[in-house]
């Protein structure tokens, strides 16, 4: 029997795709799931404008094979619409204690949490739990049942029978993003979650890389390799984004539009502060304002009550409220973040054709792969609004990722969360995983 006879690794989601990452590590005594994300619903049987039915999401997603499959992980109470499915699941239960560890609060890593069996404990870093709670409390809940993950401090080790798990903060673009270290009696598997080395000089990610040198197996995201070789673009630093935003605020005399990602609290707070220094106030849709406030941001502003919004959220007193009359009277004093799903609302704003710009910095609509991108672009075109690109990926560049893998020098690297895992060309052994296969920690297949 090989040294890695007892530890099993199965990749249940995220193979050849950006999204739906789920990794199962098990021993005869316990099971640990790393992330529990939704696959993007931009393709497949439930793509827009179809979609799972509210209240029956779990059944619809399982029938459409949009969720990972493992015995005993789903909530039986949400399967009652399909007695056959429920009976099959009940028969295939697994007696081992099971826990889920989350890398970060992005839907492709945590979106399917609400479907989990209530007996499964969910753990995540302190800031990831804070973000998930804030999303839940501000009208952006996940489908399925509400659950509160258990916060894990850095350095804290969670023990599940003979498996030990630790979360270590890394650079990404959402508070609390972590890599996960899983140790079994036979060795260590490390999962990057989503990671980059260009924000904050990659400080956390470099410390993480030092920490995990020489582990048996490294499961890594490969998002940026999906553009294909020869299509790599340099990534902007956060300082460059600040410069572009500031220059735009100073160049445009009237209203400036912004599309920033409210889950990227660090950048949103910086853009609010830059706007203030340039005599402007950033007005967010109430949903974004509620989230930023819940995450501790200050100087958050939103629309005065009465402004039509697609998904109006109640706001605390400390969020400043601005009326459309104020914006129309002094457009040069404001930056407005439009709701990407509410393009017609753009026409309410005091837009000046060929002068007003939309500063696109990772907010919605994010890109052509989103269903609302093209119609939003058509509205910008109709109103004569130019786009100023001011984004920067939260994922590692090809060069940084390959350097990271070589530095860590794991026994085996497993590329997931990208459409071109085969582009991970490194000197260490590589495993291109397949669904349904069971691997040992050294990457060999369990027959
Ligand atoms: Zn992410």
Image (cartoon, rainbow, N blue to C red):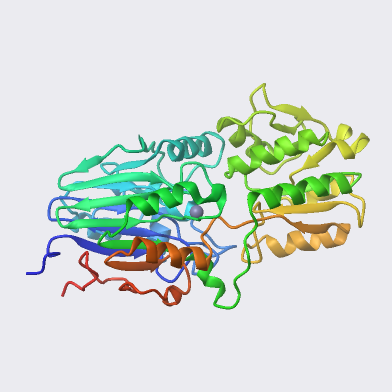
What quarter of the picture does the N terminus occupy?
bottom left
Residue at horizontal 93 percent and vertical 34 percent from the top: 329
Locate residue 34 relative to residue 20 in the image: left or right: left
Number of disc labels: 0
Locate residue 84 relative to residue 307 in the image: left or right: left
Camera sees residue 324? yes
Residue at horizontal 76 percent and vertical 62 percent from the top: 377
Q: Position of residue 187 (x, y in %)?
A: 19, 57
Q: Position of residue 199 (x, y in %)?
A: 56, 50
Foreground residue among 302 and 275? 275
Determine whether 259 is above or below 13 in the image: above
On the image, which quarter does residue 14 sit in?
Answer: bottom left
What quarter of the picture does the C terminus occupy?
bottom left
Locate residue 273 relative to residue 137 in the image: left or right: right
Determine whether 367 is above or below 350 in the image: below
Q: Position of residue 240 (x, y in %)?
A: 70, 52
Residue at horizontal 33 percent and vertical 64 percent from the top: 409
Locate residue 256 relative to residue 235 in the image: left or right: right
Q: Position of residue 338 (x, y in %)?
A: 74, 47
Foreground residue among 4 and 205? 205
Camera sees residue 53? no
Determine whether 42 is above or below 258 in the image: below
Foreground residue among 446 and 167? 167
Residue at horizontal 66 percent and vertical 51 percent from the top: 363
């Amino acid at each position: 029997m090989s040294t890695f006879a007892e530890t099993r690794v199965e990749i249940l989601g995220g193979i050849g795709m950006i999204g739906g990452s789920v990794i199962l590590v098990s021993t005869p005594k316990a099971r640990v799931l790393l992330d529990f994300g939704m696959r993007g619903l931009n393709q497949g049987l439930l793509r827009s404008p179809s979609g799972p039915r509210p209240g029956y999401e779990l059944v619809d997603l399982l029938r459409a094979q949009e969720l990972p499959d493992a015995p005993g992980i789903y909530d039986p109470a949400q399967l009652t619409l399909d007695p056959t499915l429920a009976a099959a699941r009940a028969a295939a239960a697994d007696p081992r204690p099971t826990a889920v560890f989350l890398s970060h609060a992005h839907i492709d890593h945590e979106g399917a949490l609400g479907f989990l069996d209530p007996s499964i404990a969910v753990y995540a870093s302190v800031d990831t739990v804070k973000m998930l709670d804030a999303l839940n409390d501000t009208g952006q809940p996940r489908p399925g049942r509400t659950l509160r993950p258990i916060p894990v401090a850095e350095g804290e080790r969670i023990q599940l029978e003979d498996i030990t798990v630790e979360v270590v903060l890394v650079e990404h673009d959402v508070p609390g993003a972590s890599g996960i270290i899983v140790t079994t009696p036979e060795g260590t598997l490390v999962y990057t979650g989503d990671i980059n080395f260009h924000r904050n000089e990659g400080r956390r990610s470099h410390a993480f890389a030092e920490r995990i040198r020489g582990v048996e197996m490294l499961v890594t995201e490969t998002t940026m390799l999906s553009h294909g070789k020869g299509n790599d673009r340099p990534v902007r630093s956060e300082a460059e984004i600040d410069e572009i935003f500031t220059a735009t605020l100073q160049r445009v005399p009237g209203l400036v539009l912004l599309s920033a990602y409210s889950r990227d609290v660090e950048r949103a707070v910086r853009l609010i502060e830059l706007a203030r220094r340039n005599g402007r106030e950033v007005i967010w849709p109430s949903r974004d304002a509620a989230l930023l406030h819940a995450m501790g941001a200050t100087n958050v502003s939103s629309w005065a009550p009465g402004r039509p919004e697609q998904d109006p959220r109640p706001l605390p007193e400390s969020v400043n409220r601005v009326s459309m009359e104020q914006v129309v009277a002094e457009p040069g004093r404001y930056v407005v973040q439009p709701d990407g799903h509410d393009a017609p609302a753009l026409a309410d704003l005091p837009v000046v054709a060929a002068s007003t710009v939309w500063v696109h910095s990772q907010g919605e609509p994010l890109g052509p792969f989103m269903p609302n991108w093209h119609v939003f672009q058509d509205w910008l075109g109709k109103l004569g609004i130019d786009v100023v690109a001011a984004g920067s990926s939260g994922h590692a560049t090809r060069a940084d990722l390959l350097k990271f893998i070589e530095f860590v020098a794991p026994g085996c690297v497993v590329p997931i969360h990208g459409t071109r895992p085969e582009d991970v060309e490194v000197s260490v052994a590589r495993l291109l995983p397949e669904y349904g296969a069971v691997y040992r920690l050294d990457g060999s297949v369990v027959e």
